Amino acid sequence: MSQDVTNRIAISGPGLKKQGVVVLQTLFIALCTLLEIWIRSGVGIVTGLVLCISVFAGIRFGRPGTRYVSVVTPPLAFAATLLINALISHGISISRVGIDFVAGLASVAPYLIISALYGWFMYFNEKAKTRPSRKSAA
């Protein structure tokens, strides 16, 4: 019984395009962030884990060539969600919006850093694999 069984999810088709990765990551992050803000009155570990999961899922389910979008979208989507929520809840009070925005970013900073490091590593690894070898040129 020496069968090689892998636990990978079989994706039918080539995967998500860049637009699909952006839309799904943005909606997933916005929904979970707003839900945590509504329940806890702030962001924390749940939103941080959602950010990490969305980077991993974007890399995993995207087509080849969508790694850049998978890495760049989550921090931007999270920041936009926080800013829009702060503007809606505090109005145009610059000091309150600024404090709320910076506090929200600071509370998930470790998760943003970890997911960015992983995502950029995967992006540059993909770039290095597609570049021709120096040994074959010599």
Image (spheres, rainbow, N blue to C red):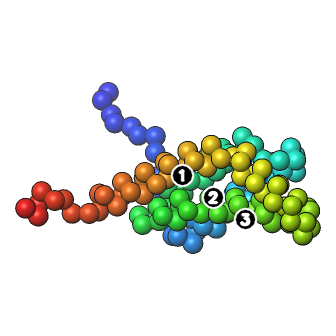
Contact, mark 3 vs mark 1 (Cβ under 8 Å): no
Q: Is residue 55 left or right of residue 76?
A: left
Residue 40 at what x, y percent from top left? 86, 44
* Secondary structure category for the residue under label 2: helix
Whichever of callouts 2 and 3 sits on the residue coming sooner in the sequence is: 2
Residue named by callout 2: 75
Give the Cα distance between marks 1 and 2.
Answer: 9 Å
Mark 2 Cα within 10 Å, few/some/many (few <14, many 20+)? many
Identify whether 1 is placed above or below 37. Answer: above
Give the Cα distance between marks 3 and 1.
Answer: 17 Å
Q: Is residue 132 left or right of residue 118?
A: left
Q: Residue furthest top?
A: 1
Q: Quadrant of the N terminus?
A: top left
Residue 39 at what x, y percent from top left? 87, 46
Residue 104 shows up from this direction: yes
Mark 3 Cα within 10 Å, few/some/many (few <14, many 20+)? some
Residue named by callout 3: 80
Taking the spot 64% from the left edge, 63% from the top edge, the residue there is 76
Which of the numbered marks, if any, corresponds to residue 116?
1
Whichever of callouts 3 and 1 sits on the residue coming sooner in the sequence is: 3
Q: Residue furthest front?
A: 95
Q: Residue furthest bottom?
A: 19
Residue 31 shows up from this direction: no
Amino acid under disc 2: Pro
* Secondary structure category for the residue under label 1: helix
Identify whether 116 is placed above or below 69. Answer: above
Give the Cα distance between marks 2 and 3.
Answer: 9 Å
* Secondary structure category for the residue under label 3: helix
